[in-house]
Amino acid sequence: MKFVQIIDYKTERPDGMNTLMDKWVEQTKGKRTATHSVVGQDRTDASHYVEIVEFPSHEEAMKNSHLPETDRLFQEMVALCDGMPSFTDLDVVRDEQLNAATARRVFDEICAAGDLDVIDQVYAPDYRDHDVMKEEDTVTGSEVMRGDVTRWRAAFDFTFTLDDQIAQGDDVVTRWTWTGLHKGAFMGVQPTGKQCTMTGTTTFRFHDGKIQEGWWHYDTMGLMRQLGVI
C-alpha cells in the first residue's frame, strides 16, 4: 500500500531549507525510497510550510528514515525551523490522477464517441495544438479539436486503445493504438473500406485542470501505406 508522510513546519529561512533539501536529494541518489515530494506554502502565513512525501509503502519509508543522510537532514531541518516540525503518517486509500482521467476523456468521449460538447469541458479556450500532420507547428484555440475530430470521424469509424499513460506534474503522456475503418475521403484518398491500425503518443500539458497544450505524434506513413498511397 502506498504511504505518504506529511511534514508541517514553520521557518523564516526558506532558502536555507531549499538548499538543505537539494543537498539531501544529491546525497541520497540510488539509496532513497521516496518517489515524490511536494512543498506548499501557506497563503495566509508565509512562514508556514507543508511538505508531502510519497513512498511505495510504509516499509520503504522506514528504509528511507534509517538512512544516515535522512537523520542528518532532520537535525539540520530542526535548526532551521521555528519550533519542532510535526509528522503525520498516512496509508493511501485512494489515489485519483485527475489530469490523467481528463486525458482519457479526450480519447474515449471526444474522439471515439464523438461527443464534441466535452471539448469545452476539458480544453482551455486558448489551447495550443501541435500535430505532425499539420503544416503549421502551432494552432491555437479549442475549436481546433472540434475540426480535427469532425474530419477524422468523417473519414474513419475508429476506436482508441490506451496502451500506457504516465502523469507527472502538469503533463500527461498517453501511448495509444488507433484502429479505424476507412469509410470517407481522407487527404485526397477515396474510401477504401480497409481496416487500418496506427500507433502514437500524445502529450497534454494542463493548467487549472484544463488542457492548455497538446503534442500529437503518430505513424502517418504507416497509415498511408495501409491505405495504398505509398
Image (tube, rainbow, N blue to C red):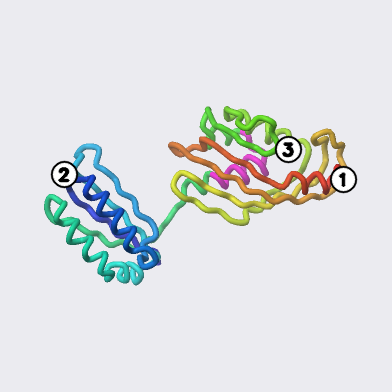
The CA distance from mark 1 to mark 2 is 68 Å
- Is there a contact, CB below 8 Å, between mark 3 and mark 2? no
Which residue position is annotated with label 1?
228
Read off the magenta span: 103-116
Q: In the visual, does 171 lie left or right of 73?
A: right
The CA distance from mark 3 to mark 2 is 56 Å
Mark 1 lies on a secondary structure that is loop
Above or below 215: residue 197 = below
- Give the image location of residue 225, x and y in percent: 82, 47
Work out whether residue 33 or residue 155 is closer to the camera in this orientation and state it: 33
Which residue position is annotated with label 3?
152
How many residues crowd around disc 2 within 10 Å: few (fewer than 14), some, or many (20 or more)?
few
Q: Residue at x 19, y 39 (%)?
A: 45
Query: Per the image, is 194 magenta?
Result: no
Q: Along the polypeptide, which appears first: circle 1 or circle 3?
A: 3
Mark 3 lies on a secondary structure that is helix
Mark 3: amino acid? Trp
Outermost residue to the left: 83
Q: Which mark is residue 12?
A: 2
Above or below 151: residue 94 = below
Q: Quadrant of the C terminus?
A: top right
Q: Nearer the viewer, mark 1 or mark 3?
A: 1
Mark 2 lies on a secondary structure that is loop
